[in-house]
Image (spheres, grey):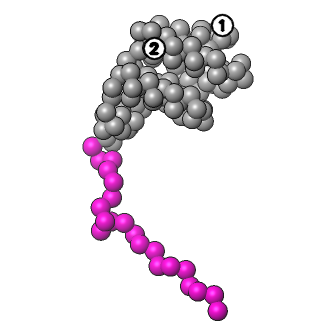
Amino acid sequence: MAEYSSLLSDLSENITNEDLEQLKCACKEDIPEEHSNNITSSKEWFSYLEKNDKLAQDNLSYIEHIFEISRRPDLLTRVIEYRTTVLKISEDEEIDTKLTRIPSAKKYKDIIRQPSEDEIIKLAPPPKKV
């Protein structure tokens, strides 16, 4: 639990008020406006997410998604490091989670795959200038 608290503290230190507004906007479908207006710090934001089952020490996929769509790779990297080092989630499990973290993507989980060699379109090199 100490590592989880440390993670949230570290993330909070790297979220400015401007960032917080962007993060709240990114999850406006999950936080009603009247609650969103009352959230004035990143710690309050994390607390709200925890109370509403969007965040837990072993469930970070929601904030990973929010950091990803908010274009905060620095915060996303910290969360992923926590998942891989503290929670010991393997790379395969991590990839599986990335594919299914968005509820609407779950139905596509089985059909998402890498193309085979035969399916890859190979382009000819560009013509040489004379």
Could you tell me which quadrant the C terminus lies in? bottom right
The magenta stretch spans residue 13: no
Indicate the position of residue 121 as horizontal and vertical percent values: 40, 69
Whether 4 is drawn above or below 23: the answer is: above
Most frequent secondary structure within the magenta stretch: loop
Quadrant in which the N terminus appears: top left
Residue drawn where x is 33% and y is 47% of the image:
112
Residue that extends furthest to the right in the rendered view of this protein: 18
Name the mark nearer the viewer: 1 or 2.
2
Q: Quadrant of residue 41?
A: top right
Can residue 112 be seen? yes
Question: Quick check: is 129 in the magenta stretch?
Answer: yes
Under circle 1, the secondary element is: helix
Q: Nearer the viewer, residue 102 or 117?
A: 117
Give the residues drawn in magenta, as a range: 110-130
- Disc 1 target residue: 38
Q: Which mark is residue 4?
A: 2
How far across and how far down the image is residue 30, in percent? Answer: 52, 19
Closer to the camera in the image, 99 or 28 = 99
Cα separation, mark 1 vs mark 2, equals 24 Å
Q: Which mark is residue 99?
A: none
User: For residue 9, what is the image quadrant?
Assistant: top right
